[in-house]
Image (cartoon, grey):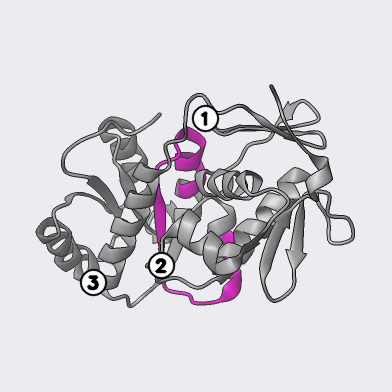
Amino acid sequence: MESPERATPRILFVEDEESISEPFTRSLEKAGFEPVNARTAAAALDLFERLSPDFVLLDLSLPDGDGRDVCIEIRRRSDVPILMLTASGTETDRVVGLELGADDYVVKPFSGREVISRIRAILRRSSMATPDPGMSPIEINDLVVDIPGRTAKVAGKEIKLSRKEFDLLAELVRNAGRVVTREGLMANVWDVNWFGSTKTLDVHIRALRKKLGDSATESRFIQTVRGVGFRFAPPEEIDRKP
């Protein structure tokens, strides 16, 4: 399920604490968004199905379940951007959230202005990620990436990638054989004015490597260039399908 285009972006705000949800809902309205509130996991999934929001702002601690489960279910249905809210700033919690398909995370208490800026940046990147429909698939080893179709196959089997994982893969294969800096990836896949930590990039690179079949000892696709960034396969292994 994909979100329909609308003039005012609809934000599904999943948060059970009134002291957070009420003032920030007003901030979202003032910022030009259409917030829809849910206080439980069940309500969040129901509203998501019925209203097709453009963005999900998701608290992890909900009275009837774990926000991570909500994230998994939403990601199963859609590539809609998800920004997680968590009371824990531990690296484990952040990594888990990103590996489940969230685009980013914010630790409570958060700055309303910063979160709104992040929402705008993620939505802007989403709207800009429209590839040339005539672009041919790119083949590297036994990997075939169809950027317009947003599919990737390894040895003929399609691999399931989150929206951000696919955007990262597309950026790397477009520049296959060349070193792409960390800063360049953050600017082009996330946003030039990104507020988040580059840890976000590391988590997505690790998840992408795992799904491609790369390992710590053998990297057929994503190569780390220490202190600079990443290179996707050596040039001699690159071939574009006619």
> Label for residue 113?
3
User: Is there any visible trace of residue 172 in the rendered image?
Assistant: yes
The span picked out in magenta is 71-96
Within 10 angstroms of label 1, few (less than 14), some, or many (20 or more) residues?
some
Residue depicted at x 40% and y 57% = 83
Which residue is nearer to you in this view: 157 or 65? 157
Within 10 angstroms of label 3, few (less than 14), some, or many (20 or more) residues?
few
The kind of residue tagged 3 is: Arg
Q: Which dot, 3 or 2, sits closer to the camera?
A: 2
The kind of residue tagged 2 is: Trp
The numbered mark, 1 or 3, whose residue comes first in the sequence reads 3
The answer to which quarter of the image holds residue 46 is top left
Task: Locate the C terminus by quadrant.
Answer: top right
Q: Which residue is mark 1?
A: 148
| Residue 221 falls left or right of residue 200 | right
The answer to which quarter of the image holds residue 28 is bottom left
Assess whether residue 53 is covered by the magenta stretch: no
